[in-house]
Amino acid sequence: MHHEQRAQTRALLRARGIDIAVFAHPHSVTWLTGFAPPVQTGRHLFAGAPPLVLYAGGHFTLVIVDAWAELAAVFGAEADGAVVTYLGYTIEQPIDGPGELRSSLELGWLASAARRARIGIEEADVPVAVLALLTNAWEPLSAPVAIDGWLTPLRRVKTAEELAKLRENFQLADVGHAAARLAVQVGASEIDVWCAAETAVQRAAGCRVPLGNDCVVGYRENNIGGWPLDFRLRPSDSLIVDLSTIRHGYWSDSCATYVAGTPTAKQAAIYQVVAEALALGASLLRPGAVCADIDLALRRLIAGAGYPVYPHHTGHGVGVSGHEAPRIVPYNDERLAPGMVIMLEPGIYFPGETGVRLEDGFLITDDGAVLLTQHDKTF
């Protein structure tokens, strides 16, 4: 599981002279190990810290609270991987996740790690107490190196294993959209539509699946995005449903705009322009294409049609995050490469009245792009 990711990381650390590394950002942890905490309501109540990945001697050790041991068993069986757990919940003594974590590290991984080494740490995400424990245990050859963001460039191009997880998520998002379309009726609320999509997704997956992002009726003053509330659909109201699923630690993304009843002439006109912009963007996706050029082309099309240009990105990557590099934005001169997964999402908005956004996902191939989303985006 995730062998290619660890091989890339190992090569990067060796090239930069790092002997020991501590990864704590949740995206780094999932990308390196395939492990994603099954938590939708915040951090684990009894954990001493978020999951950590410790690197030394070419091997990676995942450190987690014991409640997640079974979920991490696959990674623990890897030749270059190991799992260290510590006591979380107990009735035999006071609960002390931080103390149990500290004891586990002192008796295990720290005891075997080299004392004289060059150390790299994702400083922004390592808890202060853990950071002190780790750095005090060694006699580093130099000051610890901040390695925050080092893995981000490696995450741009997806492995076959990652693509399989992303495809499953896109299929779940398609299921959610089909249910949302049926639920868009006069008198229904935003939250009614959202719950229909969520129920369909979780039934299809056979488990709880976190969902993002937006479900907003057109007459909201801020009708670009937001969480679903009790705003009710009136005849010919538009509803933007921007739906992500998060399964196996990976995100899908997608967007369609639905109408309760018959679209107005204005809605039909702006839908046509947004659909043309999305099709134009899809035609520009190929290796070597410059992100800023794609962004400019879509904005020019919408402006040329006489409509206000959307104030958000034209697109972005997805993976262990719902929004990651490369970004399709005006400033970004990065070029696309085979294996990247790109979302495109142009829109036209009239605050307090109506809006349309459409979004598809694409896999960049050697000679173009393959559509990954299959949801029905027609009015």
Image (cartoon, rainbow, N blue to C red):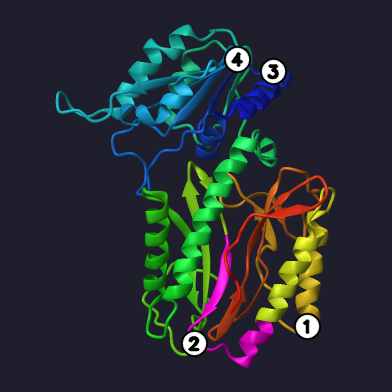
Residue type, mark 3 in image: Arg
Q: Nearer the viewer, mark 3 or mark 2?
A: 2
Mark 3 residue element: helix
In the image, is residue 267 above or below residue 376? below
At horizontal 49% and vertical 54% (from top left) the residue drawn is 245
Q: Is residue 158 left or right of residue 38?
A: right
Q: Nearer the viewer, mark 2 or mark 1?
A: 2
Residue for badge 2: 261
Circle 1 Cα neighbour tier, 10 Å, few/some/many (<14 / 14–19 / ≥20): few
* Residue 374 % position (x, y): 60, 61
Q: Earlier in the sequence, mark 2 or mark 1?
A: 2
* Residue 95 % position (x, y): 22, 29
Q: Nearer the viewer, mark 4 or mark 2?
A: 2
Residue for badge 4: 58
Residue for badge 1: 305
Q: Which residues are magenta?
A: 254-270
**Quadrant location of the C terminus?**
bottom right
Residue type, mark 4 in image: Gly
Q: Nearer the viewer, mark 3 or mark 4?
A: 4
